Image (cartoon, rainbow, N blue to C red):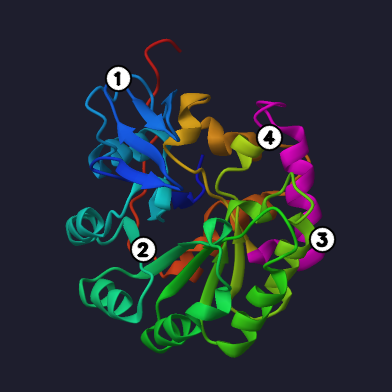
Amino acid sequence: MGKLIIDSHTHLWKKQDTWVDGKRILSLRNGRSIFMDEEVQMLPPWLVDGVNSAEVMLSNMDYAQVGGAVVVQEVIDGNQNEYLTEVQKAYPERIFCMGMTWTLDEAKAVHEAGLKGIAFPGHRMKESLLSLIHIFKYMEAQGMVLSMCLGESEAQIGEMREVIQECPQLKVAIGHFGMVTTPAFKSQVLLARAGKNVMVESGGITWLYNAEFYPYPSAIRSIKEAADWVGMDRLMWGSDYPRTITAITYKMSYDFVTKSKELTDEEKTLFLGQNAEQFYGFKNLPTLPYIKNMSE
């Protein structure tokens, strides 16, 4: 293939064991979890012990020729700071791990532990994003990256724009491709115009277009549309691994882009890896060979 591939939106956990809005989330066996009090297939069924580990992800990355990955966090998986600190120390060149915090003391702790950013599931927040401005300013001063997923409405757009303007040196990655299938899509993408260090990553785009399914022609059109608004140099590919690979393979989560005839080679290069390499500061990523499938 010959292209640098970096996944800007993945998840890892030792075990899901938490409550959200009074509803249970708990890892079971065979890739299943209790999710909001309902049993669902959270992971591929061959992850029999419920552990979504860095080692399994790296095996998937090697097979799919994905050089590096960014690990974000979500409240639905429980706080994974302790495990991700271990992962960051074990795989510093290939994996970029983010903490999850709600206080300044917690932000300082994850930074001191070696985590390189903080992920905020803003779409699950009831309070104003501006209530966290002291944390964002600390992150800006420490050179940390902010991952922010916003809601489906316009409610948080103004607040997020104010955060970007108040912290002009803070690197910000807007997640879930601006909730591309919702009314907030254009407003979220246009946040990349609010500051020079703002990017939009496509984690979950195949989930949002799951009803259409592979090869996701509407997703390609949305990528082109977003590029028209803010430039392809502000967009990054992300898979939302591992939840999305219950429906498709890991490689399918990006090769609908590589196979598209609507995007140029230069656009694919920027979107699939080059932008993320510069934004997150990846260095010395491996060149991964293609290994032929036995069935080929």
Q: Which residue is mark 1?
A: 30
Disc 1 element: loop
Q: Residue at the location (66% across, 76% down)?
A: 159
The alpha-carbon separation of the residues under discs 4 and 1 comes to 26 Å
- Vertical side of 192 occupied by 238: above or below: above
Q: Which mark's residue is nearer the viewer, 4 or 3?
A: 4
The alpha-carbon separation of the residues under discs 3 and 2 comes to 33 Å
Residue 238 location (% of width, % of height):
53, 49
Q: Is residue 159 magenta?
A: no
The alpha-carbon separation of the residues under discs 4 and 3 comes to 20 Å
- Vertical side of 117 occupied by 167: above or below: below
Residue 100, which numbered label? 2
* Mark sitting earlier along the chain (1/3): 1
The alpha-carbon separation of the residues under discs 2 and 4 comes to 27 Å
> Amino acid type of disc 1?
Asn
Q: Is label 1 in contact with label 2 (beta carbons under 8 Å)?
A: no
Residues packed near mark 2 inside 10 Å, few (<14), some (14 to 19) or many (20 plus): many
Residues packed near mark 3 inside 10 Å, few (<14), some (14 to 19) or many (20 plus): few
Residue 59 location (% of width, % of height):
29, 35
Q: Which mark's residue is nearer the viewer, 1 or 3?
A: 1
Looking at the rendering, the stretch of residues picked out in magenta corresponds to 210-234
Q: Is residue 264 left or right of residue 235?
A: right
* Mark sitting earlier along the chain (1/2): 1
Residue 61 location (% of width, % of height):
37, 40
Residue 228, which numbered label? 3
